[in-house]
Image (tube, grey):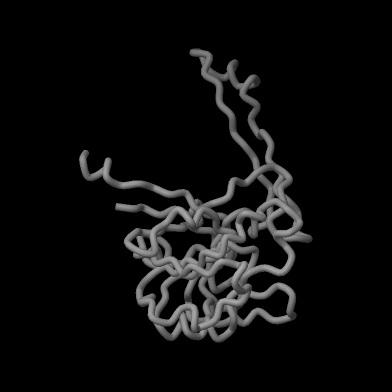
Amino acid sequence: MADTEEKRIVDLSHVIEHGMTTYKDLPGPHICDFWVREETADKYDDGSTFQIGRIDMVANTGTYVDSPFHRYADGVDLADLPLPSLADLPGIVIRRPWENSLAIEPSHLEGRDVAGRAVLVHTGWDRNWRTDAYFGDHPYLTAAAADWLAEHGAVLVGIDSCNIDNMHVRARPVHTTLLGANIPICEHMTGLGSLPDEGFRFSAVPPKVRGMGTFPVRAYAVLG
């Protein structure tokens, strides 16, 4: 019991709400009742009532994980993502405030041991979530930074920005490199400022959906 009390769980995910915009030009989720609670009481002798919800959404909604299938037709999809690449990973935070520079370069990563770890890039951009500014010039990793992370053994890479690549050019080298190396990507994170630089365990697990490359997650870190 004492061991449990010493641990703290930090939620690193945005709330998914009806009609919200995660990625500009993609539709927001439609959330509604499939079973309305008031209409279920007559199904049970004890008057129990239940709600069953329905959600229609694109996969890139809220805080989500990309699997290799998102980028590569023959890549591993959500159903085949190995849990050791998503759950209970030792984590490390790279601090790179967006006010200093939007581009995260290898020089901002050097000297940190990323091997076997979830590498979470904290830029502070999540303060713009649900605003037009979120989709403007945003923090991102460079192609060279992605190469560095893959070469140094990162297991998962996350960022609290709207895209790990620069959305304002017609190329996606970071997705290409990381997903090509079977390194899942977690985008639209939040709350990374609540984490220490290291010494925590990280998890971001999507459901096992066959034939899909991206899906929302409840990303979180366990401290202590």
Residue occupying image coordinates x 43% and y 49%: 10
Q: Tell me the quarter of the image containing the N terminus.
A: top left
Residue 207 x/y as whole percent: 50, 55
Q: Is residue 67 above or below residue 153?
A: above
Does 54 sit left or right of 224 as displayed? right
Does 5 sit left or right of 201 as displayed? left
| Number of numbered discs overlaid on the protein picture | 0
Q: Nearer the viewer, residue 148 or 51?
A: 148
Residue 113 x/y as whole percent: 35, 77
Residue occupying image coordinates x 46% and y 58%: 204
Q: Is residue 106 above or below residue 130?
A: below
Residue 201 x/y as whole percent: 35, 59
Please identify the residue farthest to the front as the structure is shown.
Answer: 100
Residue occupying image coordinates x 69% and y 48%: 56
Please identify the residue farthest to the left as the structure is shown.
Answer: 2
Please identify the residue farthest to the right as the structure is shown.
Answer: 25
Residue 160 x/y as whole percent: 57, 61
Residue occupying image coordinates x 36% and y 52%: 222
Does 31 sit left or right of 199 as displayed? right
Q: Nearer the viewer, residue 60 or 221?
A: 221
